Amino acid sequence: MQPVVQIKDIHKIYESGEVPVHAVRGVTLDIAPGEFIALMGASGSGKSTLMNMLGCLDRPTKGTYLLDGIDIDKLDRNELADLRNQKLGFVFQGFNLLARTTALENVELPMLYGRHRRASSDQIRERAMHCLEIVGLANRFDHFPNQLSGGQQQRVAIARGLVNSPQVLLADEPTGNLDSKTSVEVMGVFQKLNEQGITIVMVTHEFDIARYCRRNLILRDGIVVRDEPVKERSMAEKEMDKVRLAEAAAKLTSGAHAA
Ligand SMILES: Nc1ncnc2c1ncn2[C@@H]1O[C@H](COP(=O)(O)OP(=O)(O)OP(=O)(O)O)[C@@H](O)[C@H]1O
Ligand SMILES: [Mg+2]
């Protein structure tokens, strides 16, 4: 199968400051459909820079990038934006939901300028509702972000990332603002989506979160220094069962104390 991402010797040099910053220094990477990658590395190692290029939000200074076989260097700004809306979905650390807008409307938003932009408002609503169902939040469709927990807000953001049926979901520290239990919940959503065939690339600082993925890449000073499959993968469903059992046991013992 043709890789969905083919990157060959890409570099990114930021020229904005007085001294140019060589943030990515020759990364070569193939990503096959169905992969689930954690991109790791110290602060400043170039993770976000690489993700921005993967996401066609920024172009490499040097090197080639084929997204689903299409050479992005040959596209103008509008064509690149269309390709991005067709092929890619995004999830951010800070959720980036619009505050005065319901969960459902937040999810609908990318459809208004994506590949479904000619869909009727009923079709858009239906598709957005379906994505909220996928992340288990259909019952909260009319809630505003401040009426949702952090994990629920991130699930709305994931539903929004899915609404244009992307081939690849890109997430920059999606669990960065979440406690560990909620992080496992969000990883559970990602694992479910990945099992259904969506390719996922996510940045994380946490080794135990990276173990929910299938492949781990480590960047150092803009270079990939490690690239290996995850051997003993963590499965979110199992971890959540353990948490539930522990919580139930804690309730039982506290009940016994009270009696
Ligand atoms: N727009 C920019 N202009 C100039 N330099 C930049 C810009 N964005 C990032 N850099 C520099 O490029 C390098 C890589 O930054 P990047 O944001 O990719 O790191 P990161 O691995 O995502 O770090 P973190 O874990 O802190 O998010 C850093 O030295 C950073 O200062
Ligand atoms: Mg970053």
Image (cartoon, grey):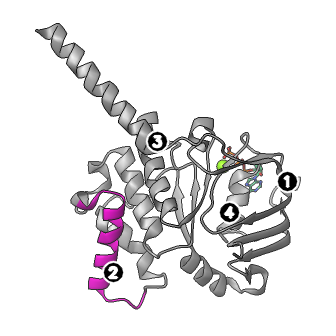
Q: Is label 2 in a helix, a strand or a loop?
A: helix
Q: Main secondary structure of the magenta part?
A: helix
Residue mark closest to the camera, 3 vs 1: 3
Amino acid under label 1? Val
Residues at marks 3 and 2 touching, judged by CB atoms closer than 8 Å: no
Q: Which residue is mark 1?
A: 21
Question: Does the beta carbon of the residue at mark 1 sit less than 8 Å from ligand 1?
Answer: yes
Q: Which residue is mark 3?
A: 183
Amino acid under label 3? Ser
Q: Which residue is mark 4?
A: 52
Q: Residue at x 54, y 64 (%)?
A: 90
Q: Earlier in the sequence, mark 3 or mark 1?
A: 1
Amino acid under label 2? Ile
Question: Does the beta carbon of the residue at mark 4 sit less than 8 Å from ligand 1?
Answer: yes
Looking at the picture, tell me which residue is in the foreground, 208 or 106.
Answer: 208
Residues at marks 3 and 4 touching, judged by CB atoms closer than 8 Å: no
Residue 90, placed above or below residue 67: above
Cα gap from disc 1 to disc 2, whole angstroms:
42 Å
Q: Which residue is mark 2?
A: 124
In the image, residue 12 lies at what x, y percent?
82, 62
Question: Does the beta carbon of the residue at mark 2 sit less than 8 Å from ligand 2?
Answer: no
Which contiguous range is marked in magenta?
117-138
Q: Is label 1 in a helix, a strand or a loop?
A: strand
Q: Earlier in the sequence, mark 2 or mark 4?
A: 4
